C-alpha cells in the first residue's frame, strides 16, 4: 500500500473555512466506475444516497468557492477502509459465534456472535481514530 495517488473524483468547492474547503462531490466513488476493473460503486451510491456527498479537505492553494477540483485519496486507502469496515467486524462476529458455541451451545453462539460484533465495531472505531490523523488516508485536492 504505497502513497501513490489514485485518479480521484471531481467536485466543487462549496465553502472555504480557513485552511480547509468543503467540497461537494459530483459523483460517489473513486471516479473509476466506468473504467475496466472499476467496481461500479457510483451506480450503487446513486441508488442508496440521494444527498450530495461533501468532504472537508485541506485547501493549501486557497481554491475559491465555485472552483472545480479533483479530490483524491492515497492508493490503497479505500481498499484498506473497506477491509476494515466489512471483514474485521464479520470475522469478529464469526469467531465470537464459534467460541460461544464451543463453550455453551446455541445460546453461547448467539451471545458470542453479539460480543464478537461489539469487539469488531470497537476495533473499527479505534482504527478510524488512529487513521484520522494520518495524511496518507486523508482526501486532498490535486487539481
Image: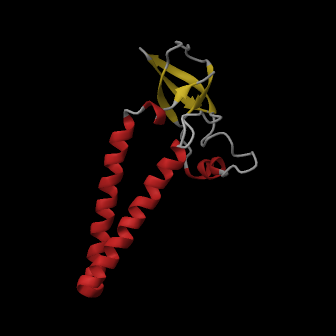
Q: Quadrant of residue 122?
A: bottom left
39 versus 87 height, above or below: above
Q: Residue at x 61, y 18 (%)?
A: 67
Closest to the observer, 50 or 59: 59
31 versus 38 height, above or below: above
Q: Residue at x 57, y 39 (%)?
A: 75
Where is residue 24 drawn, in percent x and y?
A: 55, 30
Furthest toward the front, the residue is 2
Closest to the observer, 48 or 39: 39
Q: Residue at x 62, y 53 (%)?
A: 44
Where is residue 48 drawn, in percent x and y?
A: 56, 52
User: Which quadrant is the C terminus positioned in?
Assistant: top right
Where is residue 142 drawn, in percent x and y?
A: 60, 24
**Is residue 85 found left or right of 5 in the rendered image?**
left
**Is residue 99 found left or right of 131 in the rendered image?**
left
Q: Quadrant of residue 97?
A: bottom left
Where is residue 95 drawn, in percent x and y?
A: 35, 72
Furthest toward the bottom, the residue is 105
19 versus 97 height, above or below: above
The tally of labels here is 0
3 versus 121 height, above or below: above
Closest to the observer, 40 or 78: 78
Closest to the observer, 45 or 134: 134
Amino acid at each position: 500500500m504505497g502513497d501513490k495517488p489514485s485518479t480521484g473524483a471531481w467536485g466543487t468547492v462549496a465553502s472555504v473555512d480557513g485552511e480547509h474547503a468543503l467540497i461537494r462531490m459530483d459523483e460517489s466513488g473513486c471516479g473509476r466506475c466506468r473504467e475496466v476493473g472499476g467496481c461500479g460503486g457510483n451506480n450503487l451510491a446513486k441508488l442508496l444516497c440521494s444527498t450530495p456527498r461533501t468532504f472537508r479537505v485541506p485547501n493549501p492553494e486557497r481554491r475559491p468557492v465555485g472552483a472545480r477540483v479533483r479530490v483524491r485519496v492515497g492508493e490503497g486507502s479505500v481498499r484498506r477502509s473497506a477491509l476494515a469496515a466489512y471483514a474485521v467486524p464479520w470475522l469478529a462476529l464469526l469467531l465470537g459465534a464459534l467460541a460461544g458455541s464451543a463453550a455453551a451451545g446455541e445460546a453461547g453462539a448467539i451471545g458470542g456472535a453479539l460480543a464478537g460484533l461489539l469487539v469488531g465495531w470497537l476495533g473499527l472505531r479505534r482504527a478510524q481514530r488512529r487513521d484520522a490523523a494520518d495524511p496518507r488516508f486523508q482526501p486532498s485536492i490535486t487539481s
